[in-house]
Image (cartoon, rainbow, N blue to C red):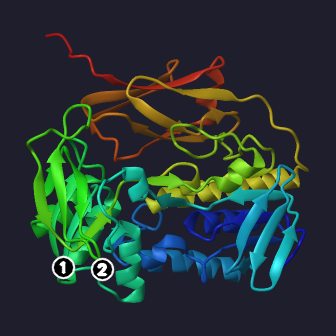
Amino acid sequence: MSSHPDLAVIGAGPAGLAAAISAKEAGMASVVVLERAERPGGILQQCIHTGFGLQYFGEDLTGPEYSRRFVQKARDLGIELVQDTSVLELTPQRRLVAAGKKGLSIINPLAVVLAMGCRERTRAWASIPGSRPTGVFTAGTAQRLINIEGYLPGRRAVILGSGDIGMIMARRLVLEGCRVEAVVEVLPYPSGSPRNEAQCLRDFGIPLLLEHTAIEIHGRERVEAVTIAQVNGERRPVPGTEQRLECDTLLLSVGLVPETELAFMAGVKLDYTTGGPLVDDRMETSLPGVFACGNVVHVHDLVDYVTLAGAAAGTAAASYVQNSGVPRGDSIPVEAGRNIRYVVPQAVRGGQDVTLYLRVAEPEEDVELRLGPGLVRQRYKRVRPSEMLRIELPAQSLQSLNGRLTVSCEKRRKSSA
């Protein structure tokens, strides 16, 4: 492994591989990708369902099929893929300390791309009272057990949370002969995509209980039951609405959070809302020469968008190195307005076309996204927090910003007769 590569990418998932490929294609001589798992490809290796690549390739692929294309392309380009290696330290000077089968390695790249992805929230985050029996899994862990290891987590399950992975696993369990008693969601609407709600729950007759949550886990050695209850407007359990669901397995699909330990260690500024690094339209963080992309920045709903963000980060990293780290110019902050939970990137420098990714805070119908002052008005019949919105801004439109860019979701005005 080279100790002084042009670029070091941390993470060999779809974002990291796309970043490495685009950097290599942009002229970087040496690119190394560090991956802690046994093989490159990221979480997609255990996602054997279809639905990947519709945007990027125009094909309906499984997760392994999608990732294999990028792994092969990276190898064809001569990118160094280093597996079974964990990055333990990242300094503000872009110095990496990594541990692998051959011991510790010190790497001093000219630029770094953070592409570590995200992790699942656990029972500790959900704060569910009760005993600590076996049979409580995150949805992603259960997915790996079934699709990679060949084990069925249980025979009768309850799923807490209606995120995409939770709904996909509800269907997967049924297909393997497990009975799914219910998918329980604390919100008044599903937190995953409408497509997965239809294809994974309704098509298989799996109950979805909205405005409910788990309030106790029963069992000593193994899960025996879960008590659920309705919640009020403050998402607190309503006394008298308790219901005991007999089961031997509880899957948790209660959200994902970016893996930001290395970014925090290096002093990269983080966004409180997304949980990931603050980035500009080049995907550069607050630390010059350190870029970030994919789910480490914010949790995407489509892997195709993860790939596009990775490619943008890799191209920008190549430009940074080729220009000998020329200091960046002033940036314009991007502000979240009415009913916008967050916008990424959080700043733009202009001079190139910009793609904005955003999520609304609450579902609404008959709205328009307004980017101002006076840039874009984009109409939507309905918007939901589970569906990420994507807006393209041409470079010439950014010249009229006058120091600010605000994105808001506004109700459309009814035209008068």
CA distance for labels 2 and 1 = 9 Å
Q: Can I make out residue 68 in this image? A: yes
| Closest to the observer, 292 or 315 | 292
Q: Residue at x 65, y 42 (%)?
A: 279
- Tell me the number on the disc at residue 178: 1
Where does the image place residue 58, in percent across and percent down from the top left?
Answer: 41, 67
Q: Amino acid at mark 2?
A: Pro
Which label's residue is closer to the chain start, 2 or 1? 2
Instruction: Rate crowding at label 1 as few (under 14), some (14 to 19) or many (20 or more) other CA atoms within 10 Å.
Output: some
Judged from the image, the secondary structure of the residue bearing numbered disc 2 is loop
Q: Residue furthest top?
A: 416
Q: Residue at x 17, y 56 (%)?
A: 227
| Closest to the observer, 150 or 58 | 150
Asked if residue 382 is positioned above or below residue 222 in the image, the reply reads above
Q: Residue at x 24, y 56 (%)?
A: 216
Where does the image place residue 411, in percent across and percent down from the top left?
Answer: 29, 22
Judged from the image, the secondary structure of the residue bearing numbered disc 1 is loop
Asked if residue 396 is positioned above or below residue 91 in the image, the reply reads above
Q: Amino acid at mark 1?
A: Cys
Quadrant occupied by the N terminus:
bottom right
* In the image: residue 326, left or right of residue 331: right
Where does the image place residue 212, in percent across and percent down from the top left?
Answer: 19, 47
Q: Can I make out residue 301 in this image? A: no
Asked if residue 51 is positioned above or below residue 153 in the image, the reply reads above
| Closest to the observer, 177 or 112 | 177
Q: Which residue is identified by label 2?
A: 153
Q: Residue at x 66, y 52 (%)?
A: 292
Asked whether the residues under the numbered discs 2 and 1 touch, taking CB atoms below 8 Å apart as contact, a structural biologist would say yes
Where does the image place residue 380, in percent across and percent down from the top left?
Answer: 30, 35
- Tell me the number on the disc at residue 314: none
